[in-house]
Image (cartoon, grey):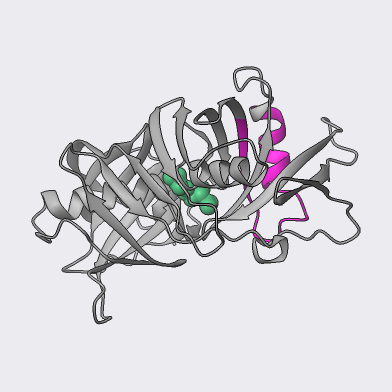
Amino acid sequence: MHIRFTKMQGAGNDFVVLDETQEILGLTRAQYRFLADRHFGVGADQILSVRPSPAQGIDFEYLIHNADGGQVEQCGNGARCFARFVRDKGLTHKDEIRVQTMAGVIAPRLEADGRVTVDMGRPVLEPERVPFDATGLQPVTQGFTQKWPLTFDGQAHEATVFIVPISMGNPHAVQLVDDVDTAPVAQTGPLIENHPRFAQRVNAGYLQIISRAEVRLRVYERGAGETLACGTGACAAVVAGIGLGLLDGRVDVHTRGGLLSIAWAGGVQDPVLMTGPAVTVFEGQIAIPDLP
Ligand SMILES: N[C@@H](CCC[C@H](N)C(=O)O)C(=O)O
């Protein structure tokens, strides 16, 4: 099978975007993995599939698959690229689009300066809904949130780190670090991602506070490894920082791939707003092998 694709990136988090508005491709998990492979396929952190939505008032549906082929609930940088894609392809003329994801409906808006702002919905702060199993753990309360000890028992990197579990539709564990450049992302990222207390696995965020309005962030993503930026990770990190009393409501998040601006009014009913770039890199066609 030959398929056409668009390669996109948002702050360096890169995507293969598939237009399935006319025909559902029905790719297997192994075929998503093949597309994401940087040696044998196109190469991407995630694959985004754009489909029409059957629901009234919803413009599109978009599916997100991690580089490991697994389908996931939400992707912030992907949402911005999705919005740029449907406008550039003439699939809609709207500036504000409503799109169904596995985690619910989100609303990207194209800005006059070329960036995209996405209403990412409300953060979920209750550990059990992340889901994080806090049974038997003693939290440390700081600000209006809690940090939980996470221990890597009997592992090469035996340690306890304090994390704030947050869901932005997908699960995140945010920890504070002194300096993201020296944070042990490659060592502890996989241990946190696969920690048994996170039943759905988790994205591991390493947050360095610079001021009340500026942070640096690295994220070891579930199913993709460390990426140059993670949009939902930036939202979760800012929510955690505000919850801990360390940040104000508007924060510039410096990632290794670029700048994301996050705003959150601080109430559990308040949505998190994310603004950042969305860029088309190239278009192409690829032959996909039969991979069951
Ligand atoms: N890069 C994304 C998040 C993609 C999904 C994530 N790896 C997960 O498994 O939840 C973003 O920009 O949010």
Q: Is residue 250 above or below residue 291?
A: above
Q: Is residue 217 left or right of residue 146?
A: left
**Which residue is drawn at the image coordinates 35% and 48% (left, top)?**
78
For the C terminus, give its image quadrant. Answer: bottom left
**Which residue is drawn at the image coordinates 19% and 35% (left, top)?**
282
Q: Is residue 48 left or right of residue 168?
A: left
Q: Is residue 25 above or below residue 153?
A: below
**Which residue is drawn at the image coordinates 51% and 65% (left, top)?**
269
Q: Is residue 186 left or right of residue 38?
A: right
Q: Position of residue 252 (x, y in %)?
A: 44, 32
Instruction: Please tell me whether residue 195 belongs to the stretch shown in magenta.
Output: yes
Visible residue check, residue 12? yes
The magenta-colored residue range is 186-207
Visible residue check, residue 39? no
**Which residue is drawn at the image coordinates 54% and 52% (left, top)?**
266
Q: Position of residue 72 (x, y in %)?
A: 49, 59
* Frontmost residue, 14 versus 276: 276
Label count reads 0
* Frontmost residue, 180 versus 211: 211
Q: Position of residue 156 (x, y in %)?
A: 83, 30
Instruction: Please tell me whether residue 290 belongs to the stretch shown in magenta.
Output: no
Q: Is residue 247 left or right of residue 158?
A: left
Q: Is residue 184 above or below residue 129?
A: above
Q: Position of residue 179 (x, y in %)?
A: 64, 19
* Frontmost residue, 29 versus 290: 29
Q: Is residue 50 above or below residue 263?
A: below
For the N terminus, give its image quadrant. Answer: bottom left
* Frontmost residue, 179 versus 88: 179
